[in-house]
Amino acid sequence: MTPPRFAVVILAAGQGTRMRSDRHKVLHPIAGKPMLVHLLDTVESIGAARSVVVVGKGREQIEAAVSGRAVDTAVQDEQLGTAHAVSMAKAALAGFDGPVVILYGDTPFVRGETIATMLERLAAGDSPGVVVLAFTPADAKSYGRVILEPGSDRIAAMVEYKDATPDQRAVGLCNSGMMAAHARDLWRWLDAVGNDNAAGEYYLPDVVAVARGEGRHPVAIEAAEAETAGVNSRAELAELERDWQARRRREVMDSGVTLVDPDSVWFSADTVVGRDCMIEPHVFFGPGVSVGERTVIRGFSHLEGTTVGDGCEVGPFARLRPGAVMERGSKVGNFVEMKKAVLGEGAKANHLTYLGDATIGAKANIGAGTITCNYDGFFKYRTVIGAGAFIGSNSALVAPVTIGEGAIVGAGSVVTGDVPGDALGIARSDQRNIGGWAADFRAEQKAKKDQA
Ligand code: UD1
Ligand code: MG
């Protein structure tokens, strides 16, 4: 179903005091992506025409985070309540004549399908005027309550906990805060909301009573608690992260990937893992990772900003940093770090190696302890290793440097100049053996110790 073009108002003017952070609350990341961006991606995916974020402090932070997107910000200088906050978005939506969905920036996981259902219900023949997204939490705490007309989805009353009678507090159906109404109704109804209540605030839920006063019949639809869960503290941030990871692990497994110990694998929102991959315990995917098919990622590997091809092997204990590219069938083993480096098809770097600012040709073999010395404290330089080259163990390749195709670098070399294709490059002092020296040394030392 394609919902009608709609606008979104995202409330984010609250202080977020309990986060104790200089970062705006809605910009704290979950799965490597700011909460606000999760929401914006969801509403864009179902066709939101416009989005307005209502901000108190920290407007610049929000603007920086959404730059390049069709998102406006509106400022609410004083937090006079949720209805007042929504009305701050009116100017930014001037000329918009369609349904408006109100969301909370700190409640990032409402599903697109749920928003589409709200819009569908708003457009239904009985013209409800307002659709409220409700939920029935395990613990109703101090949420606002939604009182329905018996046997119907029509709302008889919305009541804030502070203003509720004991009977009303006993109702399990709660207001998520999310709501949909048509722009032309919403602005008029908001103007009619007063602040004569326990908190002295302009309550958004009061638009329900105003709509009823005009003969409309606002309705509630119910969502799962996971969709309405919000973040007020770091502990709640961690809870939402945990729930997100649990959902994603399930999706990844359903798509044909083996997670040996799902609970210890962490994904980012944009992680892509192909079919028949196998991921061992304790693997972390930071943002920007794409893995092909049939690749094995062994335990304790950390990947970010990395592209791994089909049939590769990674780790255990590999660190793939931004710009690392592993082409088909290549291998990176334990304690290998790659950054801005391409490892060609079938190439191997199996042990204790740093490959930075480097291009490594197909089937090259990078010996244990190889280091690309890419930085002189001021500038970065590239290392190019040709196809089929063999770099002996414990070599330092001082960039800029090129090792030709099929060349061999002798173990322990400090390579400061290019090595031609098929040549042996060896850069270490010649070996000298002194017959009997070790035995003589031991005898001398032992004699000294016996005398002491
Ligand atoms: C609100 C609802 C309550 C609902 C609950 C769900 C009202 C009056 N009450 O209560 O029915 O059960 O959410 O979590 O709407 N905000 C602003 N400007 C303001 C006030 C709030 O932008 O002046 C933003 C906050 O940043 C937050 C959201 O609106 O994202 C909700 O505000 P909050 O103060 O948390 O409302 P609750 O008291 O929890
Ligand atoms: Mg709240």
Image: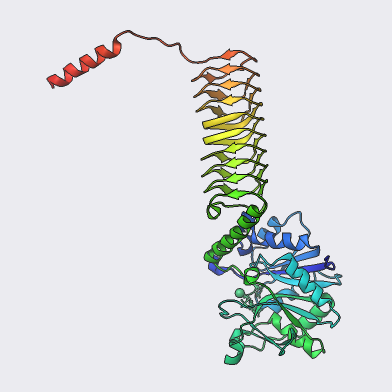
Between 120 and 280, the one lying in front of the other is: 280
Q: Residue at x 61, y 83 (%)?
A: 172
**Quarter of the figure that contains the C terminus:** top left
Relative to 362, is 301 above or below?
Answer: below
Between 110 and 164, the one lying in front of the other is: 110
Q: Quadrant of residue 103?
A: bottom right
Q: Position of residue 281 (x, y in %)?
A: 52, 48
**Quarter of the figure that contains the N terminus:** bottom right
Is residue 374 visible to us here?
no
Q: How is the image coloured?
A: rainbow
Q: Quadrant of residue 83?
A: bottom right
Q: Residue at x 56, y 24 (%)?
A: 398
Is residue 134 visible to us here?
yes
For ligand 1, give the image quadrant: bottom right
Q: Position of residue 366 (x, y in %)?
A: 56, 26
Relative to 260, is 190 above or below?
Answer: below
| For residue 443, side relative to residue 331 (left or right) | left
| For residue 435, side relative to residue 312 (left or right) | left
Q: Position of residue 256 (x, y in %)?
A: 66, 50
Q: Quadrant of residue 28?
A: bottom right
In this view, the residue farthest toward the left is: 451
Relative to 368, is 66 above or below?
Answer: below
